[in-house]
Image: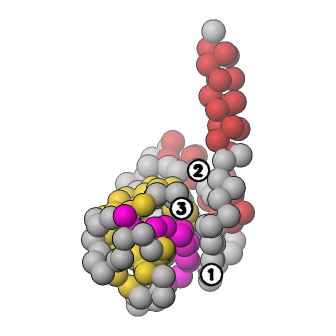
Amino acid sequence: MKGIGVLIVLAAGLALSGCGGDTTTTFVLQSASPSASGASAGGSPAASANGSASSSLPTTAATPIPNNLKIIIDSPDASTAISSPVEVLGTASVDRGTVVAVVLDASGAELGRGTATASASKPDYGHFDVSVSFSGAVSGTKGQIKVYGVSPRDGTTPTNYYFVSVRFA
């Protein structure tokens, strides 16, 4: 009976992994350490199991993102009309777990910004949830949500990027 439950979970995971063929989502990745995900793939679960996690943040393990991406936005997606404040949820592997989310209008002007700390930091992957209040959006127009990590050197220089197109409610 337990084997059937495992098969159902695996089948659901495979079905969900095929989702996301959204052609309006744009990925832009810049990373100073492309080998970071290789270190996390084998080390994160074992480190959590024996109590010596590699990050100083509380570890709520997240699955590494395919294609060596360091940040992904799970919600909202391109089919969602957003209004202020918007909750931005996702997964990241960034320095100190610091994630910045920015709402941009169609011309790229910043309408609002929020900062959060993911549940784990680089090289591990953690979940993030950041609320962004914004103003100046025109209902029915398109915009973007940009999420990025910041450099540990100065705490402000963006390191990894992920964009998703949205429309304003």
**Nearer-N-terminus badge (1/2):** 1
Disc 2 crowd rating (10 Å Cα; few below 14, some 14-19, many 20+) is some
**Is the stretch drawn in magenta largely helix, strand or loop?**
strand
The residue under the point 36% across, 71% down is: 139
* Residue at the disc numbered 2: 63
Residue 54 point in image, percent of width and height:
50, 60
Residue 140 point in image, percent of width and height:
42, 69
Q: Nearer the viewer, residue 110 or 136?
A: 136
**Which quarter of the rendering shows the C terminus?**
bottom left
* Residue at the disc numbered 3: 78
- Dot 1 amino acid type: Gln
The residue under the point 37% across, 54% down is: 58
The residue under the point 62% across, 14% down is: 2
- Dot 3 amino acid type: Ala
Disc 3 crowd rating (10 Å Cα; few below 14, some 14-19, many 20+) is some
Q: Where are the magenta residues, as a range?
A: 158-169
